Amino acid sequence: MLSKRIIACLDVRDGQVVKGINFEGLRTAGDPAELARRYNAEGIDELVILDITATLERRRALADTIRAVARELFIPLAVGGGIRTDADAAAAVDAGADKVSLNTAALSNPSLITTLAERYGSQAVLVAIDAKWEDDRPAVYVRSGSTPGNRDAVSWAREAEDRGAGEILLTSIDRDGTKAGFDCKLTAAVSRAVSIPVIASGGAGTLDHFVDVFTDGCADAALAASIFHYAETSVRNLKTHLRDAGIPVRL
Amino acid sequence: MIALIDYKAGNLTSVRKAFAALGADLFTPERPDDLASADAIVVPGVGHFGATRALGPEWIQAILGRVGELRPLLGICLGMQWLFEGSDEAPELAGLGLLSGRCYRLPSTDVKIPHVGWNSLDMQRENTIVDQVEDHAQVYFTHSFVAPVTGDTVAVTSHGQPFASVVQRGHVAGVQFHPEKSGEVGLQVLRNFLGMVG
């Protein structure tokens, strides 16, 4: 049976892992390669490197980080943050990324999804959707959650799938960094609307939050950052908890 | 030297890197003739079966020639599907035909397709490319089409229904999963292949 995946996200700025609360207030959480090594030893299923730097030197620094992480780890590695063009995607892939995650660029230039899916295969194209509830509507936001995307998350996820996305990385802006639990309502709405896997992100605080998102939220994978970075729980501990709750995991 | 066939079906960096971690340097043949010096052949690949169109009659002849000289061949993901007679994904194209059967799309009746993530290998027989891999070990998959379970099947995986996740017939082996992305289990499979090369 297909396991539910646990994915660790490394938010990287200037070569260091940081994690914000609601996308702001960053603090250093460590060296990416060192953290990646620790997660791999603990049994993480996949890694996401999210580049949150915005300098001209960004791409080269990011490639160095990807190379350092990819050199010794043989599990899937996705890279996102600031990937806007073919060249950005190619630089990430050449450095060792298995998947690239598109966010703002996918919404402003949806044909980029298709271009990259044709070049690298759909399995290499993740479309990241940041959403928050506005009345009863899950509204898409771009530019690190600062700008309304004027789209509904469910219809955008469907369109992304049609255009060739292989997976959706769905982040709840309302829950990100709050440790109040994943947004199961949002996740289930998107997961039921598409046939590609949906990775839930934002809000992980307890082990039971993961149980909830895999059951009520219909998530195929769950992503977290700070819950692992500060060693509040180990990946193995989380997976044991999930297995005991009847959720298939790789242990 | 082991040849890694590049037919532009996905990125070969991770396959090359995983073999390098085991001390094996792979070369990418530019022309079919380059295979004359190959001790073994790896056909990787992800994506659409139509991509195998790039491997025309000359490539097929060169690869079959080496296989006929008992050089080990490993197909990974799409490369494994190519070992069969063909695939419903691109019915107009023939596969290598080293294994009998046709690849088909997994039905999406009660599971999500594509099949993405870690799933288990249920071993069917011993002394194969998956030696020293525990029964039910989990490996990383990403695909929508699958190969049928036949006498050449070494391991079966289920996603809605069972399919062949590892196949082997003599020195021709194939894995539907990505050994280069399956942690230590995947590296063991590549190590076993290097053992076949000798």
Image: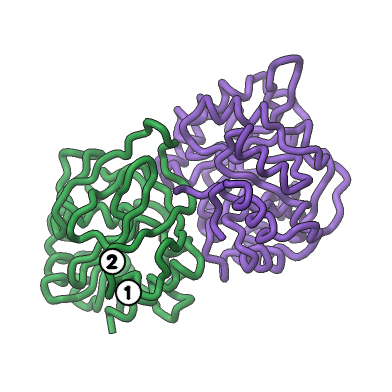
Chain colours: A purple, B green
Q: Position of residue B107 (x, y in %)?
A: 33, 35
Residue at image position (60%, 52%) is A243
Of residues B108 and B98, the one nearer the viewer is B108
Contact, CB < 8 Å: mark 2 with mark 1?
A: yes
Is B54 positioned to the left or the right of A247 in the image? Answer: left
Q: Which mark is residue B193?
A: 1
Question: Which of the 4 quarters of the picture holds residue A184?
Answer: top right
Q: Is residue B191 above or below residue A96?
A: below
Q: Chain of mark 1?
A: B
Is B5 positioned to the left or the right of A203 in the image? Answer: left
Residue at image position (44%, 81%) is B23
Q: Position of residue A59 (x, y in %)?
A: 65, 54
Of residues B112 and A173, the one nearer the viewer is B112
Question: Which of the 4 quarters of the picture holds residue A168?
Answer: top right
Which residue ends up furthest to the bottom in the rendered image?
A: B198
Measure how far apart labels 2 and 1 are at the Cα level: 7 Å
Of residues A33 and B133, the one nearer the viewer is B133
Q: Is residue A55 above or below residue B167?
A: above
Of the residues under marks 2 and 1, which one precedes in the sequence? 2
Give, as a three-letter code, the residue at label 1.
Answer: Phe
Q: Which mark is residue B74?
A: 2
Residue at image position (31%, 71%) is B129
